[in-house]
Image: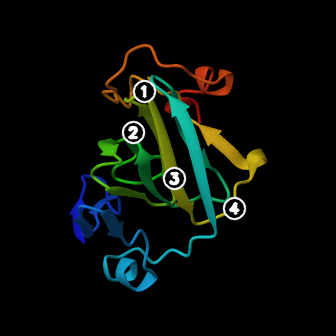
Amino acid sequence: MNVTTTILPGVLLITPKVFGDSRGFFLETFNAERYLKIGIQDTFVQDNHSHSAKGVLRGLHFQKNYPQGKLVCVTSGSVFDVAVDVRKGSATFGKWVGVTLTAESHQQFYVPSGFAHGFCVLSDTADFHYKCTDYYHPEDEGSVRWDDPDIGIQWPISTPILSPKDAKAPYLKEL
């Protein structure tokens, strides 16, 4: 597996080794020992899967008291995936990094706890899978507005399809 660091500490782009031939392919999507060697010490306790249409933007989400680290990948289609540092006092607070993930690349994006996370769908549809380091607590969820000018994410879409909750998320400076 190949690991690429990003401008945000702990946020990683992981390219697994894929074994393919005319029949298809095989890859290992998670191996605790291998991921520990690249610095991911988390224990994952919940897996989630979402299916979305083109133009859907989900995020930017985080949990306040039960922060979740996430290991994400796309199993069909393509998305632009984003991590934003929301750790108060962090030297990179409010900074973001984004990557395009596709089913064909098999890449994974590791977003440690303390980061807001979101993605927008670039293909007709996309299936998005993510492992989480803590259970989802709906009463603990926080969000940041997707187009917060203080963060300045350069999304590849200008008029996303948002949930009502995401459409009225607060700006980072309001948190």
Whether the residues at callouts 3 and 2 have beta carbons within 8 Å, the answer is no
Q: Nearer the viewer, mark 4 or mark 2?
A: 2
Residue 131 coordinates in the image, percent (x, y):
54, 61
In the picture as drawn, the residue positioned furthest to the front comes out as 23
Q: CA distance from mark 1 to mark 3?
A: 17 Å
Residue 126 coordinates in the image, percent (x, y):
46, 37
Horizontal placement of 162 versus 74: left or right? right
Q: CA distance from mark 4 to mark 2?
A: 26 Å
Res 79 quadrant in image: top left
Q: Which residue is mark 2?
A: 77
Which amino acid, mark 4?
Tyr
Which amino acid, mark 2?
Gly
Q: Earlier in the sequence, mark 4 or mark 3?
A: 3
Whether residue 16 is visible to the viewer of this picture, yes or no, is yes
Residue nearest the observer in this picture, 61 or 161: 161
Q: Which residue is mark 3?
A: 129
Q: Which residue is mark 1?
A: 124
